[in-house]
Image: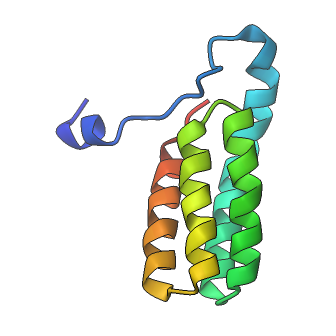
Amino acid sequence: MSPADSANPPIRSELADDPDFRELLEEFGTVVPERREGLLAAHRGGAYDELRKRAHQLKGAGGGFGFPQLSELAAELERACVSGDPARIAESLERIVGYMNRITI
């Protein structure tokens, strides 16, 4: 593992070792790229209310699939959208997208 990899290691679900959740986690893993792209598209279009709604959905999904930090990051993005502060929204979006890029199933 390179130093850059150790700074940004893959993120696994807290439920990854539970065989009862394997299929659900695999399904979640297939939609992560789509959800990430939806966040980015909403941001590019300046659709902050849509971005807030997508963040809210991720907030619920994160905990349910064993990614509590995803829920925390999504909650922050949701709050940023409510604030309407473009810089805060961009920073929150960057953090959540970086996190989502590291999810591995």
Q: Who is closer to the viewer here, 59 or 36? A: 59
Give the x, y percent position of residue 89. 51, 77
Give the x, y percent position of residue 52. 70, 72
Q: Is residue 11 above or below residue 48?
A: above
Question: In the picture, residue 64 is in which quadrant?
Answer: top right
Which residue is painted at 71% across and 86% down in the image?
Answer: 47
Give the x, y percent position of residue 31. 75, 48
Side (left or right) of 15 relative to 69: right
Which residue is painted at 50% across and 86% down in the image?
Answer: 85
Q: Who is closer to the viewer here, 9 or 89? A: 89
Q: How is the image coloured?
A: rainbow
Which residue is painted at 64% across and 78% down in the image?
Answer: 82
Q: Is residue 34 above or below residue 21?
A: below
Question: In the picture, residue 12 is in which quadrant?
Answer: top right
How many numbered marks have been drawn onto this rendered protein structure? 0
**Residue 34 seen by the camera:** no
From the image, which quarter does the C terminus lie in?
top right
**Residue 4 seen by the camera:** yes
